Amino acid sequence: MINKISRMITIFFLIIAVMLILFFLNGMTVHTVAEKNIETHFLNDIAQKGITEGSIIEKFNYSNSKTIFFENEKGEQVVATYIKSLYFNKWKQYYILQLNAEQNMQYSGNNIVVDDHIFEYGMKYQLNEKGKLFVMPVEPLKSILAIRLFGIGVVVAAAVIGRIVGIYMQRKR
């Protein structure tokens, strides 16, 4: 009876560990926006901030992310970057930048580091000669997924070795 309970507890903790690992690989967050609803989500988000009567003027895809550009007649510009989940076709908003007409003249650029769960890379948000926002990658891709998988592999190997040593020590008694 105690053996069955011990095995059930071990299986329960293994299931919890696997779920935590999968959650860790996905950036410790939940992605809720379906791909077909990204634009609607973006427009609703900026409408809540009072920016309306404009349209999406451009889209930029890079690696596992999508960037959407918005502009209205008042000269207000908004850009948002969405990243994709590793497991499903769900997205989440990673970064948003809003500039009004006065800020357009003073804005000198902004660098952010995007972690899209597979790669990590730098993106530069800046204005072109016409005063329109654009984005470009500035840092090379770094494989974050490989590093995370290696770390998880080390932890799993240590756990397995610890379990084997524990069983061996128990039999030796």
Image (tube, rainbow, N blue to C red):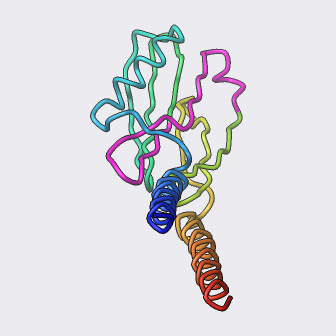
Residue 138 locus on image (x, y percent)? 61, 56
Query: Quadrant location of the C terminus?
Result: bottom right
Asked if one can make out residue 118 in the rendered structure from this viewpoint, the answer is: no
> For residue 89: magenta?
yes
Number of numbered markers: 0
Residue that extends furthest to the front in the rendered view of this protein:
1
On screen, 142 above or below 61? below
On screen, 20 above or below 91? below
Residue 127 in which image quadrant: top right
Residue that extends furthest to the left in the rendered view of this protein:
36
Is 94 on the left or on the right of 91, as rendered?
right
> For residue 60: magenta?
no
Residue located 40% across and 15% down the image = 54
Front residue of 8/77: it is 8
Asked if one can make out residue 20 in the rendered structure from this viewpoint, the answer is: yes
Residue 124 locus on image (x, y percent)? 62, 46
Residue located 47% across and 56% down the image = 12
Front residue of 57/24: it is 24
Residue 97 in which image quadrant: top right
Front residue of 41/53: it is 41
Residue located 45% across and 57% down the image = 15
Front residue of 80/106: it is 80
Residue 49 locus on image (x, y percent)? 54, 12
Residue located 47% across and 66% down the image = 7
Is 77 on the left or on the right of 155, as rendered?
left
Query: Quadrant location of the N terminus?
Result: bottom left
- Bounds of the magenta segment: 81-107
Residue 130 locus on image (x, y percent)? 54, 31
